[in-house]
Image (cartoon, rainbow, N blue to C red):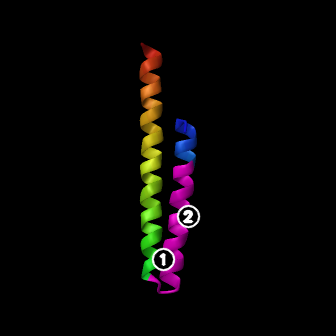
Amino acid sequence: MGSTSDKMAGKGNEIAGKVKQAAGDMTDNPKLKAKGNAQEAKGHAQQAKGKIKEAGKEFVDRL
């Protein structure tokens, strides 16, 4: 994936994770809340990966 698609997928996972966490809170379902936390963390990692790719590309382009 490219840097933009990584960042977009990451944002999607963050949002979906937050929704799952909220649903877990409302239904008193700790498993769903934990899945939401994990998905949100995955989203943060994907966004970081996209930013690193972008920074690497910018660095190479400056050479």
Q: Callout 1 environment at 10 Å: few (<14), some (14 to 19), or many (20+)?
A: some
**What residue would you read off at disc 1?**
32
Q: Is residue 25 magenta?
A: yes
Q: Which residue is at a point 55% across and 61% down the rendered structure image?
A: 15
- In depth, the one of 26 and 57 nearer the eye is 57
Q: Quadrant of the C terminus?
A: top left
**Which is more foreground, mark 1 or mark 2?**
1
Q: Which mark is residue 15?
A: none
Callout 1 touching callout 2 (CB < 8 Å): no
> Element at badge 1?
helix
- Residue 62 image offset from top left, x and y in percent: 44, 15
Q: Residue at x 46, y 70 (%)?
A: 35
**At x 46% / y 24%, what residue is drawn?**
58
Furthest-top residue in this view:
63
Is residue 27 in the magenta section?
A: yes
Looking at the rendered structure, the kind of residue marked 1 is Leu
Number of numbered discs present?
A: 2
Q: What stretch is highlighted in magenta?
A: 9-29
10 Å neighbourhood of mark 2: few (<14), some, or many (≥20)? Answer: some
Q: Where is residue 17 in the image (x, y as percent from the top left)?
A: 50, 65
Q: Main secondary structure of the magenta part?
A: helix
Residue under numbered circle 2: 16
**Residue type indicated by callout 2:** Ala
Callout 2: helix, strand or loop? helix
Q: How far from the left and from the top, in percent, is residue 45?
A: 42, 50
Q: Earlier in the sequence, mark 1 or mark 2?
A: 2
Q: Is residue 17 above or below residue 60?
A: below
